[in-house]
Image (cartoon, rainbow, N blue to C red):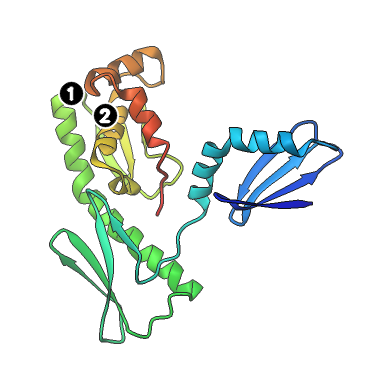
Amino acid sequence: MKEITDKDFGKVFIRENNRARQIILRVKPEGVYITTPPAYPLKEVLRVLEQFREKLVRSRKKIVSPEIDPAYSIDGELFRLKFIAGQTGRFLCRSQGEVTEIIYPPDTYFEDKELQAWLRKVITELLRKRAKIILPVMLEELSRKSGLSYHSVKITSGQSRWGSCSSQKHISLSLYLVLLPLHLVEYILLHELCHTVEMNHSAAFWNLLDRFCQGRSRELRSELKNYHTGF
């Protein structure tokens, strides 16, 4: 197996497989794994890597989460979070205006894996609380303005998609929406509202969505690819 260093992935591992008929790329937390047919030219491997670099970077962001430490923060339009050093021996959470603060004990060992998992659960619940306050109100307002009605809305912790709409007009929205820029949140809400009329992604669907996105629906869809559900 060959190993090369890469600016985006840290490590790229290249290995030959006698049964491989084409080049295969897989993203894992420790780097990118590339499987090739025997005697596959390295120059061609690097060309394929560059061809799919943007897509691989997006995939890597979905599986590699930054470590939470005292410098960790979220500074979005709909949700803001930061860590503050405290003086007591326990964690506290408080709101300071539009900012949610997590106050940590002075002797906190952030490298502890169990603490990392617990902090992620805490932040997820804070996001859920914020999403339940903001997203239904935004959806109702956009429904009123667009004339597109729905039956119900629920907030989920799903990470496979930003939102969905059933044939019965029940809309589900990911709590991670509150991490997006406001204009992309509105785009996704309108996207799901349009599914109450057009259930697939036909030309009629995109034409309908364009009516409410000033003709920018595909442009906004492309911009959304720079983000992922999670934190």
Amino acid found under the numbered disc labelled 1? Ser
Q: Is residue 96 visible?
A: yes
Report whether 231 appears left or right of 97. right
**Number of disc labels:** 2
Report whether 163 appears left or right of 147. right
| First in residue order: circle 2 vs circle 1 | 1
The numbered disc on residue 187 is none
Marks 2/1: CA distance? 8 Å
Q: Secondary structure at mark 2?
A: helix
The numbered disc on residue 146 is 1
Amino acid found under the numbered disc labelled 2? Leu
**Image x and y of residue 166, in percent:** 36, 30
Residue drawn where x is 26% and y is 29% of the image: 190
Asked if 165 appears above or below 231 in the picture, the reply is above
Asked if 59 appears above or below 126 in the picture, the reply is above
Residue drawn where x is 24% and y is 68% of the image: 101
Q: Which image quadrant is residue 163 in?
A: top left
The numbered disc on residue 190 is 2
Along the line of sight, which residue is nearer the eye, 2 or 211? 2
Q: Which image quadrant is residue 150 in?
A: top left
**Image x and y of residue 157, in percent:** 38, 50
Q: Which image quadrant is residue 51 in?
A: top right
Q: Is residue 169 visible?
A: no
Contact between marks 2 and 1 (CB within 8 A): the answer is yes
